[in-house]
Image (cartoon, helix red, strand yellow):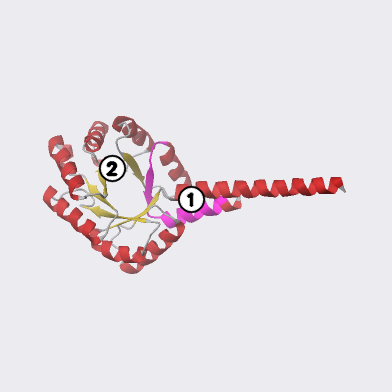
Amino acid sequence: MQEAIGQTNLTNDDEQYKEFKRIKRLEEAKASVAKIECDCLSSFTDKIILKETCKTANALGIGAVVVFPSYVKACVSYLGKDPQTALIAAISYPFGEETTDVKVAAVKRAVKDGVDEVEVSAPMAFLKDGNWAYFKKECKKIKKSARMRAVRIVINCSLLNEKEILKASVTAADAGVNCLRLNFADGELISKVKTAIKGKSLIKAERAENAAAFANACVMGADTVSCTSAVELANYLLKQAESN
């Protein structure tokens, strides 16, 4: 009788341990999903797609949805009250050609429309020209115009050499921006930027379209990662946590 009770207790302990491990895996998966950001910056993305994306991202706990400024108001409505997913406006996408005044006006409008954060493309022509004073001043003006909203600066790494990328990253971080989005950056470059900015800004990587690429970007120093297949990636991570 005592042996049977002992075996029952062992079975219960084993089941409790399995459930504890499952909950732990799920918590870790949810933390990973919160680092994923869904890019909705295609010319084929309409309001029907955005509505479904916002609804699904909210349900899964995806970190953010990135949209064009003209869609901010609609997406605020789609995400509803007390959303789990942040809303980010991509301004001056993709090369930052607009003047600082135009960018500032767009930031103010996005804030008025209800955006949580703004993601502003750096003026690539000025970076190539080495006009760091212009860039730093622009970052500060954008930061001021965003009020209490977080500001990300997008650096298109495919158009710059490594020295220019590091200089641009340090300049933006020193200007007080909250996050750097490094487009077309591999893991090694992400690591170098993270070292250069000394924790002054977060880093966002992009194009992590599968679990392996996502994990690699995080290991190399990315705090958040954007992709177009965010919903699929989030579902995969959550299902893996439940099935292991």
Q: Is residue 10 left or right of residue 86?
A: right
Quarter-wise, where is residue 213 in the image? top left
On the image, numbered disc 2 is attached to which residue?
A: 178
Is 237 one of the magenta-colored residues?
yes
Number of residues whose C-alpha sits closer than 10 Å to that of mark 2, classed few (under 14), some (14–19) or many (20 or more) = some
In magenta, the rendered stretch is 220-241
Say if residue 122 shows up in the picture.
yes
The first of marks 1 and 2 along the sequence is 1
Report the amino acid beneath label 1.
Lys
Proximity of marks 1 and 2: CB atoms separated by less than 8 Å: no
On the image, numbered disc 1 is attached to which residue?
A: 30
Residue 243 screen position, x and y as percent:
60, 52
Secondary structure, mark 1, is helix
In the image, residue 103 sits, relative to residue 178, either above or below, namely below
Q: Residue furthest front?
A: 2
Residue at left offset 29%, top offset 66%: 74
Nearest the eye: 139 or 111: 111
